[in-house]
Image (tube, grey):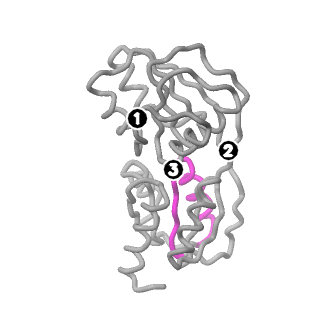
Amino acid sequence: MRIWLARTEPGATRQAASLAANGFGVLKAPVLGIEALQTAPPEGPFDVVVFVSEHAVSCAAANGWPCGPAIPIGTAAARALQARGVEPSWPAQANAQGVIDVLAPSPPGRVLVVKGQGGRTTLQDWLRARERTVVEWDVYRRVPLDPGIQGERVDAIVAASGDGLRVVEQLWFAEPRDARVPLLVPSERVAELAKAMRFERVLVTAGAGASAVVAGLLKLREGSGNG
């Protein structure tokens, strides 16, 4: 099987190595790039600082660290914090709902969310509904890339986010491509988006991490009998 990895770097390279180690062919072709923004951190302190991704960590580091206990979303964000000498105050969470579950027993009064421009506001809305103060710090933006997949053989697609999936849809259906191509996505929310985009065979993995994607593709390969 040849897998199109559409996720951003540096995650694409790490995930490509994991797939290759498990015998998959890999077409590493990100559809989004990350552009850091130059912006000073908001004035603290904060009771909790949530880093929504590995990109949020690296771009925040370039602009000066915010003050407050850290919650990373995703293991890559946790590793990025630790690599910069910041130990997360909570284990890495898979998504915003995981952060809500951690904070629900005692919602903090003042929270900083370190993120990219746009994106979902599930966590922020939950905190504001409980009359907590939420500050958003946009430290990067996503820019479309041309991955050059025209004419490439693709047996399955891995998309790591809704933003990336929107670009995948445009590229995939710009050619007479098969809507039944297996599409792996990290959550039910992205799966619903994919189904609305005409993709007919959508598989949800346990997050966007390499181990979850490998597990999903191994199951797919076993079911199809393809190498």
How far is disc 3 from disc 2 in space, using C-alphas? 13 Å
Front-lying residue, 33 or 47: 47
Provide the residue designation for mark 1. 90
Q: Please report whichever mark, 3 or 2, sits nearer to the chain's N-terminal start.
A: 2
**Circle 3: residue type:** Ser
> What amino acid type should be assigned to the residue bearing mark 1?
Trp
Please give the name of the residue rendered at 59% of the width and 37% of the height, measured from the top-left corner.
56
Q: Are marks 3 and 2 in contact (CB under 8 Å)?
A: no
Mark 1 and mark 3 lie on one chain; the one further toward the N terminus is 1
Extreme residue toward the left, this view: 105
Front residue (pair 90, 5): 90
At label 2, counting other C-alpha atoms closer than 10 Å, the crowd grade (few under 14, some 14-19, many 20 or more) is: some
Question: Residue 212: x, y in percent?
Answer: 42, 60
Q: Between marks 1 and 3, how big is the CA–CA gap?
A: 23 Å
The image shows residue 16 at horizontal and vertical percentages of: 59, 66
**Residue plotted at (48% across, 30% down):** 70
Q: 14 left or right of 197?
A: right
SS state under label 3: loop
The percent position of residue 166, horizontal first and vertical second, equals 55, 52
Q: Residue at x 46, y 19 (%)?
A: 134
Q: Which residues are magenta?
A: 155-176
Pointer 3 residue: 161
Disc 3 crowd rating (10 Å Cα; few below 14, some 14-19, many 20+) is many
Disc 1 and disc 2 in contact, CB within 8 angstroms:
no
> Which mark is drawn over residue 34?
2
Q: Is residue 8 left or right of residue 97?
A: right
Q: CA distance from mark 1 to mark 2?
A: 26 Å
Mark 1 in CB contact with mark 3 (< 8 angstroms): no
In the rendering, at what x and y percent does residue 141 appear?
A: 65, 38
- Give the secondary structure at mark 2: strand
